[in-house]
């Protein structure tokens, strides 16, 4: 039983690395620069290792004879892979409060987590894995002694633990900043609406409340500076967080859009304060 578990974990690591290499090559060619597209620092994309492990445990035992099992294998492969991809997206979003990929603009997508195009890719991969890769992998594996596999698993596991801790810390920093950005955007939006309503309906009353205006201006200005300073520091100094933001464009776009919203609303508020100050000066 111990050796069986080791073999499955070893397989998970191998195909996580192969998946990482394929995805990095694909993205690097598309963007014409070297890109580490994995969530982790190291050469590993766990979603591919998980997919291959699921295929090995469920599809391979059902794959023969091929003339009778090919269609069921393809269909089941699509379903299983979609479940893995959807679950991974959902779990990562709940853990880090961020959407790591988004297929919302793709044809026949489900909540932006999976889509028809990638489902078709998974069907092709299911066929390639079950009928081509799995037999070759088992053949090559027979040349690797069991004790070597065991040592490799524990060494990789130790390195992976450190890698995962650093990456999760970076993702948590992004999550913390995104929460602050969204909370401050809500605050600024609320204050902007209140100021707009006051300016339209109770302008004289608002003008007379100079202390409240000054207090509000200082409070928002301080929060605004802290938020933007934190965002710039994260993207400039935190290399781990910046790497994730560069890899997962949906998160970078969400952060940038939130900052732009805040800047727009803040400029509106500053304009109102400026107009108010001018009105007060003229009144004096």
Image: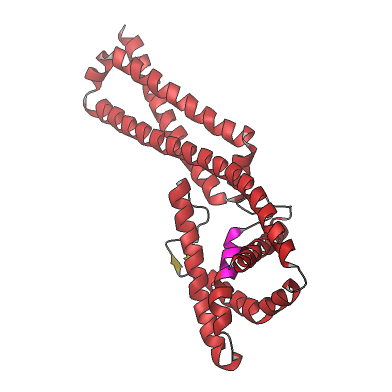
**Residue 52, magenta (yes or no):** yes
- Is the residue 191 above or below the residue 131 in the image? above
> Quadrant of the image for the N terminus?
bottom right
Magenta stretch: dominant secondary structure: helix
Q: Quadrant of residue 166?
A: top right
Q: How many marks?
A: 0
Residue 17 appearing in the image: yes
Left or right of 10 in this view: 214: left
User: Along the horizontal axis of the image, is 54 left or right of 189?
Assistant: right
Q: Nearer the viewer, residue 88 or 214?
A: 88
The single residue placed furthest to the top in the displayed view is 284
Q: Is residue 38 magenta?
A: no
- The answer to whether residue 106 is visible is no
The picture places residue 255, in percent across and down from the top left corner, at 50, 42
Q: Position of residue 23 (x, y in %)?
A: 66, 61
Quadrant location of the C terminus? Answer: top left
Say which residue appears at 58% left-offset and 43% top-offset: 165
* Residue shown at the point (73%, 52%) measured from the top left: 34
Residue 218 picture location, percent across and down = 40, 18
Q: Nearer the viewer, residue 9 or 4?
A: 4
Span shown in magenta: 46-53
| Spot occupied by residue 133 in the image (x, y as percentages of width and height) | 68, 76
């Amino acid at each position: 039983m111990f050796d069986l578990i080791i073999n499955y974990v070893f397989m998970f690591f191998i195909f996580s690395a192969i998946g990482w290499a394929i995805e990095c090559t694909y993205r690097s060619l598309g963007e014409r620069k070297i890109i580490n597209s994995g969530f982790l620092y190291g050469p590993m994309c766990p979603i591919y290792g998980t997919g291959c492990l699921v295929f090995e445990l469920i599809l391979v035992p059902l794959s023969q004879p091929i003339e009778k099992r090919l269609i069921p294998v393809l269909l089941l492969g699509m379903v299983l892979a979609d479940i893995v991809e959807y679950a991974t997206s959902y779990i990562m979003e709940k853990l880090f409060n961020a959407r790591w990929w988004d297929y919302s603009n793709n044809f026949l997508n489900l909540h932006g987590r999976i889509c028809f195009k990638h489902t078709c890719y998974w069907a092709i991969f299911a066929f390639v894995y079950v009928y081509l890769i799995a037999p070759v992998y088992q053949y090559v594996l027979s040349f690797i002694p069991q004790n070597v596999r065991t040592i490799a698993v524990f060494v990789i596991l130790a390195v992976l633990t450190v890698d995962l801790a650093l990456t999760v810390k970076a993702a948590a920093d992004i999550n913390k900043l995104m929460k602050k950005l969204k909370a401050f955007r809500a605050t600024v939006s609320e204050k902007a609406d209140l100021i707009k309503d006051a300016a339209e309906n109770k302008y004289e009353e608002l003008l007379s409340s100079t202390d409240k205006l000054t207090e509000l201006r200082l409070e928002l200005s301080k929060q605004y500076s802290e938020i933007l300073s934190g965002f710039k520091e994260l993207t400039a100094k935190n290399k781990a967080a910046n790497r994730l933001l560069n890899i997962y464009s949906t998160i970078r776009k969400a952060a940038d859009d939130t900052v732009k919203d805040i800047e727009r609303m803040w400029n509106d508020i500053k304009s109102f304060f400026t107009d108010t100050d001018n009105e007060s000066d003229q009144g004096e």
